[in-house]
Amino acid sequence: MLFPISGAHISPIYLAVIGFLIGILGGFFGVGGSFIAGPALRIVGLDWNFAVGTDLAHIVGKSVVAAKRHRALGNVDLKLGLIMAVGTIGGAEVGAQLIQMLKRAGNVNLVVSIVSIAVYVSISSFMIWESRKTLASRKPLPPASAKGAKQDRSAFQHVTRAIQRLKLAPIIHLPVSGVRISLWIILAVAFVGGLFSGFLGGGAGYIRMPSMVYVLGIPTHLAVGTDLFEIIISASYGTFSHAVKGNVDILIALVMHTGAAIGAQIGAIMTQYFTGPKIRLAFVPLPLIGAAIVIYTLFTGHKL
Amino acid sequence: MKKEALKTLRAFLIELAIYAVLVVCYFFLVLHFLGAGLRQLEVNHRYTYACVSILLIIGQAVLLENVTTLLLRLLRGRSE
């Protein structure tokens, strides 16, 4: 089928199936899934610029569905999500500027590839260590520090608590997550996520979701739901920016989203049946897939 | 418990089948009626196109979420 905006011929069934699979991942892990959607669109012949912009537009729609479902399950901290959106947008702009600087220096591909491989492998290694240690410890869940806060436990909790004790005014109270923490730490986490989003592309949920759990101390279920809510805002900003530059084929995004809408709901509902450490352990392969794709492009020169 | 799980799975599979039919109809409607207009907008009015794109994807997300929830409620005969 011809999509007139990008001029690409793609099967709508293929797009809906890809959307469905990414929707499940997004709803379950709170990630955009751009490391899969980008290559999936490239494989069927969509230009790289359209693949990036169109994927962002589809992420907006998928995140609306998944965040709505997570909100119904009590997994969204709106206050935290809104604060994080500010930091993410700032970070994304700085990341995009860094890319421009590296482009001028002429070594953008090598630097971005090495940084992304290091980041992806580090996240996976850390999460596999932490989640396995937490699951093996069999310690009881800590008492909820606020009514309604979802309980979670982590082998890294002592570091998280030390970060939460830092008295950098203003201190923000997040009753839904059951956390009191400095505003600057929230903004710093969001800024770093945004920086990687602008620098490496995609929504950078693979960095933001673990950071929310390990640095801010947000329970895993809430980190997933809140990350999705935050992605609605930051991906909308990214979609607008790319659409103005002529990088979005909204018809492809709409068709992909028909599959993602149902996949995202399945993913969100599935989180109810898994504990926080198990969700984090299942998350481990995602950054590794991202690293494998980067290694492939680095060695073959084919940008997927 | 097992009976309940089977009922849910059955309802979900029927929902998926109905949804698939609706989606195929939707593909053709969207591409037929929106394709040319959006192409013109993308070429001539980029900022309007950017705003319309975001509104379309969010609008579709809300619509499909409601459709799937409604389908599931009808099939299961009770609210989730």
Image (spheres, coloured by chain):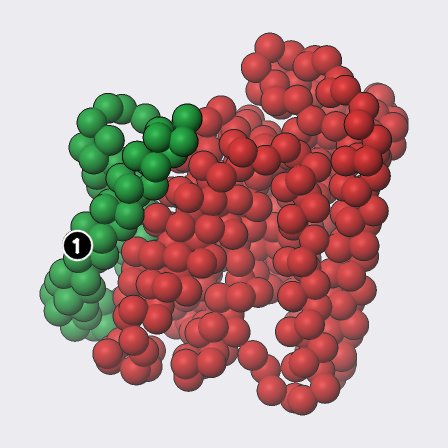
Image quarter in which the C terminus of chain A is found: bottom right
User: Between residues A145 and B70, which one lies in front from this camera angle?
Assistant: B70
Chain letter matching colour red: A
Give the amino acid at mark 1: Leu
Q: Is residue A104 left or right of residue A224?
A: right
Residue A293 locus on image (x, y percent)? 64, 74
Give the residue at x 70% y 37%. Answer: A277
Give the residue at x 17% y 54%. Answer: B22
Residue A15 locus on image (x, y percent)? 35, 68
Q: Quarter-wise, where is residue A82 in the image?
A: top right
Q: Is residue A66 left or right of residue A290?
A: left
Chain letter matching colour green: B
Residue A269 visible somewhere in the drawing:
yes
Give the residue at x 53% y 66%. Answer: A36
Question: Callout 1: few (<14), some (14-19), or many (20+) C-alpha neighbours within 10 Å?
Answer: few
> To which residue does mark 1 refer?
B22
Q: Residue furthest front?
A: B2
* Looking at the image, residue B28 lies above or below residue A43: above
Q: Give the number of marks.
A: 1
Residue A3 locus on image (x, y percent)? 26, 76
Residue A234 visible somewhere in the drawing:
no
* Looking at the image, residue A177 lies above or below residue A227: above
Give the residue at x 67% y 30%. Answer: A218
Residue B68 locus on image (x, y percent)? 26, 41
